[in-house]
Image (cartoon, helix red, strand yellow):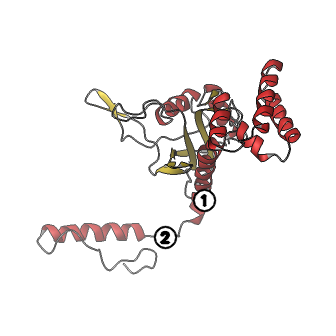
Amino acid sequence: LDIEVPWPVPYPDNKKHRVIWQNGIQTAKDMFKVDGAEYAFSTWFTKAKEIDLASVILGEESEDEAIQEVFLQCLYRNYSEEEINEIIKLAKDAYRAKDKGSKNWLTYVEDQIESKKFEAGMTERRAREILNVIDNGEFLIRVKFIRDDSIYDEEWKYSFRVIDKYEPIRESKKAGGKYVGGGPNVILTKKTKPGFWVGIDEKFLVREVSEQSEVGRLDSNAVVYGLYRIRKPDVNQLMPMKDGALNCVAERVIEHFDQAKRGHGPASGSISGCTIGDGSC
């Protein structure tokens, strides 16, 4: 659904975001697909460099190719002429630097490009478009969370992990004057109000962690939702039963518990002597 109903902003062209969040989102969607989800889509936000200038410069074979790539990326992001000229000058100076590629060079180039906020959380407009795309079935909703699992060992090694919320999303129920979890499964249909998705996403796309954490407000996060169709049994595929089979089972159950009451054995265990459908009662 992220392709049919895209986010309001594109992914940033940033190595860290690509390796952690973009790969994490795709991995979670692939996991949902393998698991049998009918649809999957994501929400996310981040604060990142809009242009990964160092990667562009180091990735091109000549200065002209590097400048051309920087220019195209600036055009794609609708930069003003003044902004484009400033970034191209920076790119030329960085490409010609004697220490190009060194740790100090990487730090300097990265510091010259300001970070921007990318907001792709759920909105009523996108929720409405998603509901228009899905079919008329009923769906359960499951969630996967993407977490930054990077480590620093002289340099950053970017990685991610997917945390799976195996149980479907449930409704809240009122207990003791407040709402708690544990209600029935939420059932999604085309008639679900768009505001529902906005509320769900505000809960799961966490932006601040607990006061005990050193992280505080998160710079990046991502959530992936999977929709599982609720399939109703096909009566034409059910095993046929002979006349009187249900009555036979009922009689055996009553007989079993009557014997237990008279002290002829516990009320647990199997009820023998009856096989539904073969007339052996």
Q: Residue at x 79, y 37 (%)?
A: 96
Give SS at disc 2: loop
Q: Residue at x 85, y 40 (%)?
A: 63
**Quadrant assignment, res 56:** top right
Q: Is residue 224 above or below residue 122?
A: below
Quadrant of the drawing holding the C terminus: bottom left
Q: Which of the labelled discs sits on residue 241, or is there none?
A: 2
Q: Residue 118 versus residue 65: which sits nearer the camera?
A: 65
Residue 110 in the figure: left or right of residue 263? right
Q: Residue at x 68, y 36 (%)?
A: 12
Q: Residue 7 versus residue 172: which sits nearer the camera?
A: 7
Where in the figure is residue 95, as x and y percent of width and height? 78, 38
Q: Residue at x 65, y 33 (%)?
A: 108
Q: Mark 2, mark 1: which one is toward the viewer?
A: 1
In the picture as drawn, the residue positioned furthest to the right comes out as 64
First in sequence: mark 2 vs mark 1: 1
Q: Amino acid at mark 1?
A: Val
| Crowd class of label 1 (few under 14; some 14 to 19; many from 20; radius 10 Å) | few
Q: Which residue is mark 1?
A: 34
